Image (tube, rainbow, N blue to C red):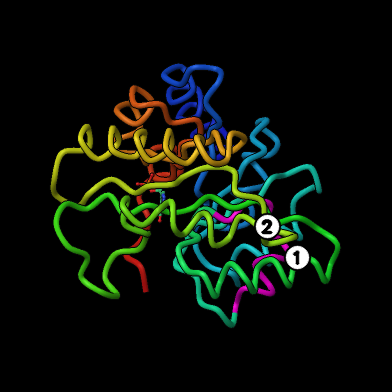
Amino acid sequence: MEREEELAVRLAEVKSEIPSHVTLIVVTKTFPTSDVQLLYKLGERNFGENRDSEGSEKSLEVPDDAIWHFQGGVQSNKLKSIVSWSDYIHSLDDLSHARKISQYAQEIGKTQRCFIQVNLDEGELIPGQRSGVKPRELMEFASAIVGLPALEIVGVMGVGPLDGDPKIAFSNLKKSSISLQSEIPSAKYISAGMSGDYKIAIEHGATHIRLGSSILGSRSPAP
Ligand SMILES: *Cc1c(COP(=O)(O)O)cnc(C)c1O
């Protein structure tokens, strides 16, 4: 019961800060399935994972109306599995991945909903370091994938900068969202904001926030 109470209290605190139009995704990565089950019991339905293996395991242990979000770095050999359990992929930034996603989704008769990840770092990208398409490349990327038969673009996703002003980053993401909607009017979602910056993200139009530590506590260092 203790863990359930702890989660209930943190959840209530966080939820009092979130307007009702914003979807809370509880990022359960590194936490046990038992935590996801408690969160489900407390009424949460949206869960986020960064690794295929964790997401595919946990998604089997929670009722079917849970909604699973994959937001980690994409490894192309994991895509088939990710498509099998995730409702949304937030971290799409690669054309070959998009083609594979559509192909795998088509094979199992689903349409895979995806956010395009936009890189919000200032300055030039250091290859292999931080993910996302550059804002100036967003429209070209979107038009390259918009015709894929079993992939639906639902919006943009961003991760606040490591150093740098989250206000500037999230207002740039909002601009990217507006451009994207000029081409794809239904792509309205903005996935932005983690435990440290979600209030700022909401001020800049986030429709989906991804919170881990503020609800579940601190994670042990990533392996
Ligand atoms: C881990 C992670 C989160 C959650 O981070 P917290 O700071 O624990 O809220 C959100 N988004 C992404 C992409 C992550 O990797």
Mainly helix, strand or loop, the magenta region?
Answer: helix
Residue at the image point whose x is 68% and y is 73% from the top: 81
Helix, strand or loop at mark 2: strand
Q: Residue furthest right?
A: 109
The quadrant where residue 177 appears = top left
Identify the disc placed on residue 105.
1
Q: Residue furthest bottom?
A: 77
Identify the disc placed on residue 120.
none
Magenta-tinted stretch = 78-89
The residue indicated by pointer 2 is 151
- State the residue in front, 64 or 3: 64
Q: Amino acid at mark 2?
A: Leu
**Is label 1 in contact with label 2 (beta carbons under 8 Å)?**
yes
Q: Residues within 10 Å of mark 2 (few under 14, many from 20)?
A: many
Residue at the image point whose x is 29% and y is 64% from the top: 130
The quadrant where residue 151 appears = bottom right
